[in-house]
C-alpha cells in the first residue's frame, strides 16, 4: 500500500536555518495493516505523516501509495488524490467551529462531485461509524473534545479512503474517549482500511490489531 524509499525532508534548504527533519527514511506499510509511529517530540512523526498524506512535499526520495507515485504530484492532483484515498485526523481536529457536524463532514465530499442524495448517504454512513449521528445538527464549538474527534474521524472516512492517518489522536482525550477511539480504529481495520498513527500514548503498546510499531529518532526510523 505505502512504499517509502530514501525519503528526505529538509526545511529551509540552503538557508542559515536549514533543518534536516527526515533522513533517508525507508518504510513499507502493507494493505489493511495498523502501524504506529512513536518517538520523542521533534523526531519527525508529523512531518512524515504530512508527506504520506500529500500535504507536504519531500526534498528527495519516493513515496508510492496504491501504486501512485505521490512524491511529485502537483498541488491540484495532490488534493484530488488526498480527497479520494486518504483520511487525515489532525491533533487539533481542524474543524470549522461555527458550522454544524453534518456540514463539517459534508464539506470534505465537495471534490468528488456527488449529487445531494449521495452526499447525504455518505455523510450519514460516516456519522454512524464514528458514533456522532445524534449530534448531526449541533454547532461544532458546542461539542466536547471526544465528540469533536469523532467528527474529525467521520470527516476522514466520508469519502471511503483506503488509508487513514491520525496524528496524536488521543492526546486531548480522557481514558474513556481514548478507549472509544481504539474501538473505532479496530472497526475501521475490519472494514479493510490501512491505518497509520503517530502517538506518544502507551495505550497503543499492546493491542491485538496493531501490526507494527516503528520508533523515530532525530528524523530516522530506528
Ligand atoms: N515548517 C518547518 N520549518 C522548519 N522546521 C520545521 C518545520 N516543520 C517542522 N520542523 C522541525 O522538524 C522537526 C520535526 O517536527 P515534527 O513536527 O515532524 O515532529 P514530531 O515528531 O511530530 O513532534 P511532536 O511529537 O512534538 O508532534 C522539529 O524539530 C521541527 O521543529
Ligand atoms: Mg507531531
Image: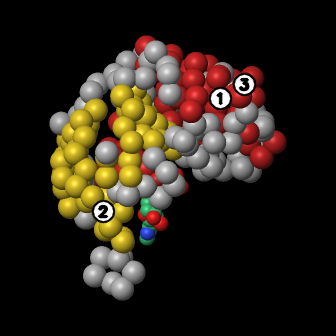
Residue at position x 43%, y 55% from top?
A: 43
Residue at position x 43%, y 50% from top?
A: 45
Q: Which residue is mark 1?
A: 178
Q: Is residue 116 visible?
A: no
Whether the residues at callouts 1 and 3 have beta carbons within 8 Å, the answer is: yes
Q: Position of residue 181 (x, y in %)?
A: 61, 26
CA separation, marks 1 and 3?
5 Å
Q: Which quadrant of the figure has residue 149? A: top right
Q: Position of residue 14 (x, y in %)?
A: 28, 82
Pick the front one: 212 or 65: 212
CA separation, marks 3 and 2?
37 Å
Classify mark 1 as within 8 Å of ligand 1 or not, answering yes or no. no
Q: Upstream in the sequence, badge 1 or badge 2?
A: 2
CA separation, marks 1 and 2?
31 Å
User: Circle 1 sits in a helix, a strand or a loop, which is it?
Assistant: helix
Q: In the image, 77: left or right of 205?
A: left
Circle 3 Cα neighbour tier, 10 Å, few/some/many (<14 / 14–19 / ≥20):
few
Hey, which residue is sitting farthest bottom in the picture? 16
Query: Is residue 216 positioned above or below 116 on the image?
Result: below
Q: Which mark is residue 176?
A: 3
Q: Upstream in the sequence, badge 3 or badge 2?
A: 2
Q: Which residue is mark 2?
A: 9
Classify mark 2 as within 8 Å of ligand 1 or not, answering yes or no. yes
Q: Which quadrant of the figure has residue 201? A: top right
Q: Which mark is residue 75?
A: none
Pick the front one: 159 or 148: 148
Residue at position x 25%, y 40% from top?
A: 27
Amino acid at each position: 500500500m505505502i512504499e517509502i524509499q530514501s525519503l528526505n525532508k529538509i526545511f529551509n534548504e540552503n538557508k542559515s536555518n536549514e533543518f534536516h527533519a527526515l533522513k533517508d527514511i525507508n518504510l513499507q506499510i502493507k494493505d489493511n495493516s495498523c502501524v504506529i509511529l512513536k518517538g520523542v517530540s521533534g523526531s519527525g512523526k508529523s512531518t512524515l505523516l504530512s508527506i504520506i498524506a500529500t500535504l507536504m512535499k519531500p526534498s528527495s526520495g519516493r513515496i508510492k501509495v496504491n501504486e501512485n507515485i505521490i512524491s511529485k504530484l502537483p498541488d491540484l492532483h495532490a488534493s484530488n488524490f488526498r480527497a479520494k484515498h486518504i483520511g487525515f485526523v489532525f491533533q487539533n481536529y481542524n474543524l470549522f467551529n461555527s458550522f454544524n457536524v453534518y456540514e463539517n463532514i459534508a464539506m470534505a465530499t465537495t471534490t468528488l462531485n456527488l449529487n445531494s442524495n449521495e452526499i447525504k448517504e455518505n455523510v450519514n454512513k460516516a456519522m454512524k461509524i464514528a458514533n456522532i449521528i445524534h449530534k448531526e445538527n449541533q454547532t461544532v464549538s458546542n461539542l466536547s473534545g471526544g465528540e469533536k474527534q469523532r467528527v474529525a474521524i467521520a470527516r476522514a472516512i466520508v469519502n471511503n479512503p483506503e488509508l487513514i492517518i491520525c496524528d496524536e489522536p488521543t492526546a486531548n482525550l480522557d481514558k474513556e474517549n481514548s478507549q472509544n477511539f481504539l474501538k473505532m480504529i479496530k472497526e475501521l481495520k475490519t472494514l479493510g482500511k490501512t491505518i497509520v498513527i503517530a502517538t506518544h500514548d502507551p495505550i497503543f503498546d499492546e493491542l491485538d490489531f496493531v501490526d507494527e510499531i516503528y520508533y523515530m529518532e532525530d528524523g530516522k526510523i530506528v
